[in-house]
Amino acid sequence: MLPLIFLSLFYFMISIKNLIIDYKDIPETWIFEHYCKLNRKLIGQDEKIKSMFNSKDTVPSMCIYFNKSIGKYKFKDFSTGKSGDAINLVIYIYELSFKDAVNKVINDYKKYINHHKEYTISEFREYTKFKVCSHNVREWNILDRDFWVRYNVGTSLLNKYNIKPLESYTMEKGCDD
């Protein structure tokens, strides 16, 4: 009888490993990597890919990025305007409700775990991004006027929003604002 208890306990330990009750137990990086078919792991960097929603996209217009303020990966597709978190991505790709998208992610992750044994989360690191550190304003010229007139934008509106023509600007990684 004792071996049967150990066998039952062993089976329970194996089966609980693959128990996913909540989609929040699934790493969001796996969701993006799996459904966007990324060829490298997300470890804090931004990834630019062709749109998942616009088949006519010829250059990468979709960005998967880490939002520091909420501590999560998100996406923005500039060719369609779609954006959101990992579950929103699945909702948009498969045109599912929230509940159905969550169930799909859970089922797909279970299949992945059963086939690959586990998903390892790589060490996360913070990537510095380029920022405008300095700029030089120049005087308005006739070309500026011709550009803005096409859009029916006059001097009062440009002044209201403090729009200025730039002679040059400098971008650096990690400069202070």
Image (cartoon, rainbow, N blue to C red):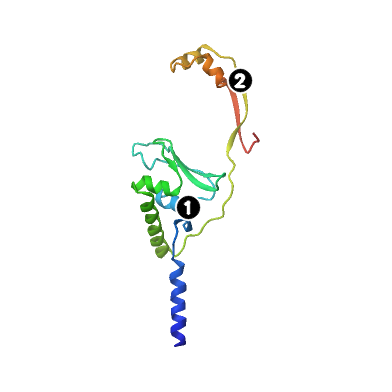
Quarter of image, res 166: top right
Q: What residue type is labelled 1?
A: Glu
Q: Residues within 10 Å of mark 1 (few under 14, many from 20)?
A: some
Question: Which labelled disc corresponds to residue 76?
Answer: none
Quadrant containing the N terminus in the rendered view: bottom left
Q: Which residue lies furthest to the right in this view?
A: 176
Picture mark count: 2
Q: Residue at x 46, y 82 (%)?
A: 5
Question: Which labelled disc corresponds to residue 137?
Answer: 2
Mark 1: which secondary structure?
helix
Quarter of image, res 21: bottom left
| Residue 131 screen position, x and y as percent | 59, 34
| Residue 47 screen position, x and y as percent | 48, 44
In the image, is residue 39 above or below residue 3? above
Question: Which labelled disc corresponds to residue 28?
Answer: 1
Mark 2: which secondary structure?
strand
Q: Which amino acid does label 2 sit on?
A: Val
Q: Residue furthest top?
A: 142
Using the numbered discs, state the Cα–Cα distance from disc 1 to disc 2 in whole angstroms. Answer: 43 Å
| Residue 113 screen position, x and y as percent | 42, 63
Q: Which residue is drawn at 59% across and 47% down?
A: 126
In the image, is residue 2 above or below residue 148? below
